Amino acid sequence: MPTQRLLLLPGDGVGPEIFAALEPVIAWVQSSMDLEVSRAQCGYGAWLAQKETLPRRVLAEAMASDAVLFGSEDNEAFSSLPPSERPASALLELRQTMGVFANLRPIRVARSLVDNSPLKPEVVEGADLVIVRELLGGLYFGTPRGVETLADGRRRGVDSLVYFSDEIERVARAAFELARTRRSKLCSVDKGNVLASGALWRDVVAAMGRAEYPDVELSHMYVDNCAMQLVRRPTQFDVIVTENTFGDILSDCAAMISGSLGMLPSASLSAPDASGRRRGLYEPIHGSAPDIAGKNLANPIGTVSSLALALEHSLHAPELASRLNAAIDGVLDAGIRTRDLGGDGSTGTREMARAIADRLPLSQPA
Ligand code: IPM
Ligand code: MG
């Protein structure tokens, strides 16, 4: 196996302090495999320093890496600028240029956190699902978009929910394949009773199910119903596939099954290139959390779990991923809790990261 390359992009908000706290964990990974790690700045910090949220050099490095671990980006920092002057989001540009259309958001309840969810223990116990969110289409990238001022002085904001059948097919394929490695159940979520793009979504996924994946138990659900079912009986789901905005919203909702948004990782994957390699962008789903940034309060588990996903899906080290996940479970079993998990505040970002690092078994360099 050639040297693997991992790029760390802490970004803004709680990202930098989480990444700094995780240096011992990164060092452990490096001591356990042949891995070259580099670090770069993007987001608001990069914009302040060089008027670019995603410097070209950083983008080129991301494209050349086997995996990119991203922290968060503080889009709020630009809210004082008029919409037309706000710089492009580094994260959205990264997703788009890397072509990572399949965003996997696994949600499971750690055994010791069953009582931590705002939902009843008997509702969340045993929940184990993955939301596959389409990441490069729909409202996030559809055109036309923008804000215009009309002749009568009113302003008009437009976004377009556009999907091409091949965009639906490629993400549905990723979801069907993932379902086959799990409990072979796929629920496709749309709003086909109202939206044209939703009706197309359902049509395309249903046809694929019949023609190519008859072994996968396929169901369809409207997105409003899905939001309800996620909190009513989350154990009914195995894999959910849905469009970009619905996936964004449903994954925050589903995060409450696990008790905290701070726990959840994500993996975004491209199609394989000629050599079979998929680009991989890994990020916790919690965002920059400006209200707690710089206070050593953020839970680093979402980022550690994202690193585990990178080890599994991009860096050919599933064994190390299992050890990282076991270390997270060990820390939670020991009752170590950041504040979002009900802790009293004595365990912060650094203490949690240290507790995880302390539970990583020494391994021989590969
Ligand atoms: C997410 C986040 C991002 C998104 C934001 C920060 C742009 O909410 O990954 O879920 O909307 O995709
Ligand atoms: Mg989101």
Image (tube, rainbow, N blue to C red):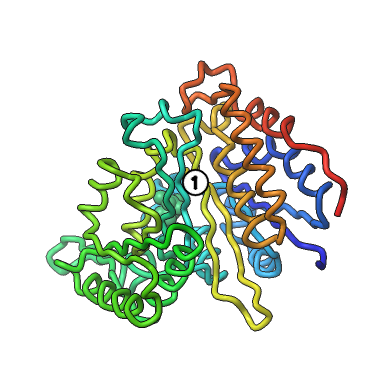
**Residue shown at 51% from the left, 20% from the top:** 343
Q: Is residue 283 above or below residue 157?
A: above
Q: Is residue 98 left or right of residue 102?
A: right
Whether residue 126 is visible here, answered yes or no, is yes
**Position of the C terminus by quadrant:** bottom right
The residue that label 1 is drawn on is 74
**Residue shown at 43% from the left, 64% from the top:** 135
**Of 184 and 160, which appears nearest the observer?**
184
- On the image, which quarter does residue 329 sit in? top right
Q: Residue 178 placed where, x, y %? A: 48, 64
Q: Residue 57 placed where, x, y %? A: 69, 65
Q: Is residue 178 left or right of residue 215?
A: right
**Residue shown at 43% from the left, 47% from the top:** 128
- On the image, which quarter does residue 25 sit in? top right
Q: Residue 80 placed where, x, y %? A: 40, 46
Residue extending farthest to the front is: 215
Q: Residues within 10 Å of mark 1 (few under 14, many from 20)?
A: many
**Residue shown at 28% from the left, 66% from the top:** 159
The amino acid beneath tag 1 is Asp
Residue extending farthest to the left is: 152
**Position of the N terminus by quadrant:** bottom right
Whether residue 88 is visible here, answered yes or no, is no
Label 1 CB less than 8 angstroms from ligand 1: no
**Of 338 and 180, which appears nearest the observer?**
180
